[in-house]
């Protein structure tokens, strides 16, 4: 992966294989559970149901029991993934300050069945969380079970509650990218979707995160990024200084 990034920095062309970053939420509707439960409407499944509503009274948020002094939330991704980032939607009707100083951990084995199971840390988040935010792991972390644990409890009513947790990453068996050189070449195609003022790395990563993108045109002079959702039989190549193309 480091070699891939170094080639991007030198404006070399990247060939994106079928192995790419998942653009779908890996936690969506997957099995989830918590260390405790305040009530039947506050179950862990609410936090992986795909809803972005944030009012607890709507039955869309998770909520541990007051007095739980080491609350946690676990979701089983049903497969081994290299996790890159997590998005959390906090409770919005009130009490958003309860989501603070938490740790996002990845386990290969079920931590509820094997309390001593080894884990890796995606992020040790300090301070108070906002209403919604994307948390990038310090480094990609491999695991099947993702656990959000709040070790610092201020008082008995400092519960763990939030409304949605989304997980993004790549399949563990999908770690290689193929690439080739192709400077000063661009594809002339009517299906190019352009974005202005992007770095070459951001351009390629945007393509990787898109389920439909198969390649990019990048102009290092204008910093224009052209995403290629698909190619056409009549598409032609054009030599143009300052441009790189990948398929």
Image (cartoon, grey):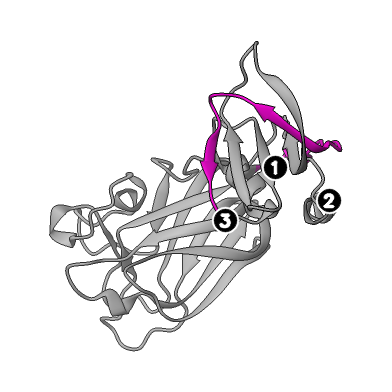
Q: Residues within 10 Å of mark 3 (few under 14, many from 20)?
A: some
Name the residue at 65% across, 12% down: 234
Instruction: Verify whether residue 126 appears in magenta.
Output: no
Front tag of 3 and 2: 3
Place of residue 14 in the rendered image (x, y in percent of width and height, measured from the top left)? 77, 40
Q: Nearer the viewer, mark 2 or mark 1?
A: 2
Instruction: Compute the Cα span from label 3 to label 2.
Output: 20 Å
Which residue corresponds to mark 2?
Answer: 7
Q: Is residue 212 visible?
A: yes
Q: Which secondary structure class fits the magenta region best?
A: loop
**Nearer to the camera, 120 or 165:** 165
- Residue located at (35% from left, 88% from top): 154
- The residues tagged by marks 2 and 1 sit, at their Cα atoms, a distance apart of 23 Å
Q: Earlier in the sequence, mark 2 or mark 1?
A: 2
Q: Position of residue 189 (x, y in %)?
A: 60, 24
Q: Is residue 15 above or below residue 162?
A: above
Q: Which of the two labelled residues, at mark 3 and mark 2, occupies the earlier sequence position?
A: 2
Q: Dot 1 corresponds to which residue?
A: 172
Where does the C terminus fall, quadrant-wise?
top right
Q: Which mark is residue 197?
A: 3
Q: Is residue 190 magenta?
A: yes
Contact between labelled residues 1 and 3, with CB atoms less than 8 Å apart: no
**Element on which disc 2 rests:** helix
Badge 3 element: loop
Q: What span is colored magenta in the figure?
A: 171-197
Labelled pair 3, 2 in contact (Cβ < 8 Å): no
Across and down, in percent, residue 223 comes to 63, 53
């Amino acid at each position: 992966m480091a070699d891939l990034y170094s080639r991007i920095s030198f404006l070399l062309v990247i060939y994106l294989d079928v192995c790419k970053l998942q653009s779908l939420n890996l936690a969506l509707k997957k099995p989830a559970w918590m260390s405790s439960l305040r009530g039947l409407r506050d179950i862990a499944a609410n936090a992986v149901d795909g809803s972005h509503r944030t009012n607890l009274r709507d039955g869309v948020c998770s909520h541990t029991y007051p007095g739980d002094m080491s609350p946690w939330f676990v979701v089983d991704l049903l497969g081994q993934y290299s996790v890159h980032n997590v998005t959390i939607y906090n409770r919005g009707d009130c009490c958003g300050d309860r989501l603070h100083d938490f740790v996002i951990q990845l386990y290969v084995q079920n931590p509820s069945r094997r309390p001593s199971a080894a884990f890796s840390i995606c992020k040790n988040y300090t301070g108070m969380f906002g209403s919604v935010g994307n948390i990038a792991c310090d480094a990609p972390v491999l695991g099947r079970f993702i656990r959000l644990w709040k070790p610092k409890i201020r008082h008995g009513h400092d519960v763990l509650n939030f409304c949605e947790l989304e997980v993004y990453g790549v399949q563990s068996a999908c770690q290689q990218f193929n690439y080739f050189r192709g400077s000063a070449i661009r594809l002339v195609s009517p299906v190019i979707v352009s974005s202005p003022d992007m770095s070459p790395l951001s351009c390629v990563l945007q393509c990787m995160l898109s389920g439909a993108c198969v390649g990019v045109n990048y102009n290092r002079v204008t910093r224009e990024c052209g995403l290629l959702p698909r190619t056409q039989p009549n598409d032609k190549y054009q030599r143009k200084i300052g441009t790189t193309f990948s398929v």
